[in-house]
Image (cartoon, rainbow, N blue to C red):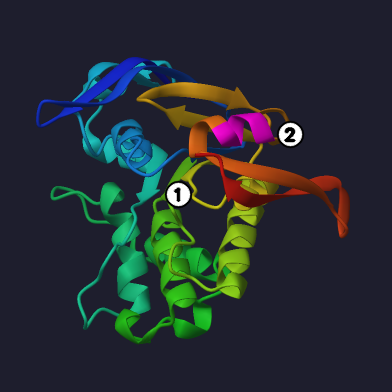
Amino acid sequence: MLATCNLTININHKLILSDISLDFKEGKRTAIIGPNGCGKSTLLKAVSGLSRHYQGDIFLDGQNIKNWPRKKIAQKMAILPQGATTPADLTVKELVSYGRFPYRSLFKSSDNNKDRAIIDEAMTKTKIGKLSSRLVSTLSGGERQRAWIAMALAQQPQILLLDEPTTYLDIAHQLEVMQIITELNLRENMTIIMVLHDINHARMYADDIVIIKDKQIFAQGAPQNVLNPANLATVFGVKADIYQNCHNPEDKIIFPVALTK
């Protein structure tokens, strides 16, 4: 469904990513991890179509996205960037309604009833229906993040891209957001691609892991295969122990214990 081929990105004459070739698995949750500044967010912006300053190719449904209008891409993919902000006087429902923009035309009136139904459904899925008339600026961090996810869902995408969706949230709201993402994947068969900092979130909530280091793909595979002490030491410079999760014996918890340098 979505793939990159020999993707190379330079920004202000600085090489950020080099020769990245990836196949994102349809209907699965992929987590992109790596050290700060390694190019994770840059990769997400490129595959979403937000940035076209790259060499190489990005394919969506077998077609190069450089040949796609941005509105058509937005009907297939939705992205929630890190640190998104809204005007102070915007309500939750107004924010979510922006997700219908890719389907609106200057030459054809939109189906208001259909749009309203899709907007309401997006708010229901993210559990913010009761907040529809609230100003986004008055919401808690977790509520605000769910509102942004609802806006992305209103685009009716097949692929949802998330850049650090749990940043600045407390533990309870982090789990709430990750569980919503998991439900979307399971119930809608939605392909999820997310940049994550929390290694344990990546292990618990991803089917496939992509590790970026030194501008290239260091490893890709199932969490249990690539999130091991040796890789964590090489990529992040930390010594880590792995313990069995008492609540789920099939899962493990990664616990960094010391720097390796």
For badge 1, the amino acid type reads: Gln
Q: Is residue 11 magenta?
A: no
Quick one: label 2, few (<14), some, or many (20+) residues within 10 Å? some
Q: Main secondary structure of the magenta part?
A: helix
The x, y position of residue 149, in whole percent, is 45, 60
Q: Would you say residue 92 is visible in this rendering?
A: yes
Which element is circle 2 on?
helix
Q: Which residue is mark 1?
A: 156
Q: Is residue 200 left or right of residue 72?
A: right
Q: Earlier in the sequence, mark 1 or mark 2?
A: 1
Q: Position of residue 126 (x, y in %)?
A: 54, 67
Residue 211 or 238: which is nearer the viewer? 238
> Image point 53% across, 74% down: which residue?
170
Residue at 46 percent of width and 57 percent of height: 165
Which label number is shown at residue 224?
A: 2
Q: Secondary structure at mark 1?
A: loop
Q: Residue 14, position in %: x, y?
A: 16, 27
- Are the residues at dot 1 and dot 2 in contact (C-beta closer than 8 Å)? no
Q: Which residues are magenta?
A: 228-233
Location of residue 135 by image quarter: bottom left
User: Is 100 displayed left or right of 13 in the figure?
Assistant: right
Q: Residue at x 49, y 50 (%)?
A: 197
